[in-house]
Image (tube, rainbow, N blue to C red):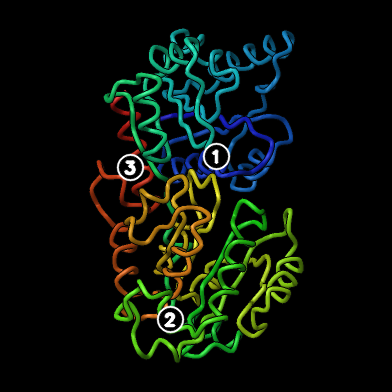
Amino acid sequence: MRTIQVINVQWYNATAWYAVYLAHALNQAGHPSIVVGIKDSLPLQKAKKLGLDTYELPLNSLKLKDIWACNRGISELCRAFNPDIVNCHRGELFFLWALNKHKFHYKLIRTRGDQRLPDTNMINKFLHRKCADAVISSNSKMTKYFASNLGIPARKLHTVLGGVNTKEFYPSKEDRESMRTQYKLTDKDVLVGLIGRLDPVKGHKEVLGVFKNLFKKPLGSPLNSETSASDFKKEASAVNLHLAIVGGDCDYTIEDLCQMGKTLGIPQENLHCIGYVDDMRKTMCMLDLGIIASLSSETVARVAFEMIACHVPIISSSVGVMPDILDEKYIYEPYDFHRMEKLLRMSQDETFRHELQTECVGRFEAKEIDSVYGWSVEKFVEKTLKIYRDC
């Protein structure tokens, strides 16, 4: 099957990752795929590094000359490549692909991996109901919105979360031991990892604030008189909780966050400000728990899947796709610091972490193709191809 993956954003965000990663996975599975984007954009640069064919179009411009050039480029590309499927991961100039679908006999897919809710005007409803052969969402919240607010029939509406190459992300006892030795961590140390770009939306400030509270009270103590002491093992007071912050500089630098933790009074031996690393898998392997603390977004949550693929259990805020990944008992609402603190205290208990790991890995490895579970790259491709073929 021959596909065109259209991703017209300038930056390499989660939506771009989904599109480029899907094109690469389809190519690897024997389905020729081209990435179409805007000139000099990061998604096209990433696609080229992966060895993918790319094609530039002025997809984000509403100037008449650019719309004309874009339409001409679509015609040239379709004549040369003869796609079976065109999958648009953004909505800009989506109508041009709709206008050309019957001329070039391809099926048109609209994939939504954006946190912003789609417009519900008549034009958008027409494009999604009548022009798109299928609509794919990267999380159930968005899928329900499409059904209730745009009236997309169930037969055309699908939820596909994403996938991870388990040859790149996998658990390793040897790597875990070597990395923990490097950071002087013992068996009594529980390392929580907050991984992602150093952007305020990822919740670094909020997590540091909760960690400050954890060190104000004995780590093994209940949160308050309403919290049963049975929630925590007696030996938890001997556990030493650590936080690792990993990711490239953005609105924050790693130095900013290290200083923030110091100002809050978090013991410096318990705060590891690591910053950007080349080998993320090895870093993930040394974690005992991951936290997705985002205040919004996470419509794809690539880091969550990568940590689980390394057999690292996670807790999370309730944003985006996370309720599709975790049971609600492992989730807190953004800014519910009391609930986040309780989950972090519970993570001191090895039994709690083991139960959470079992659930996370079990969902990751699920084999049912019609389930939102099952997040390997093979399942990602299989689920997407089933939608394409059904069209």
Residue kind at label 1, given as amino acid type: Thr
Residue kind at label 3, given as amino acid type: Glu
Label 2 Cα crowd, 10 Å radius (few <14 / some 14-19 / many 20+): few
Depicted 240 relative to depicted 362: above or below: below
Alpha carbon separation for disc pair 2 and 3: 30 Å
Q: Name the residue under label 1.
A: 15
The kind of secondary structure element at disc 3 is helix
Alpha carbon separation for disc pair 1 and 3: 19 Å
**Nearer the observer, disc 1 or disc 2?**
1
Depicted 295 relative to depicted 190: above or below: above
- The residue shown at (64%, 45%) is 46
- The residue shown at (56%, 74%) is 213
N-term mark: 1 or 2? 1
- The residue shown at (37%, 80%) is 349
**Nearer the observer, disc 1 or disc 3?**
1
The label number, if any, that marks residue 382 in the structure image? 3
Residue toward you, 37 or 179: 179
The kind of secondary structure element at disc 1 is helix
Q: Name the residue under label 2.
A: 173
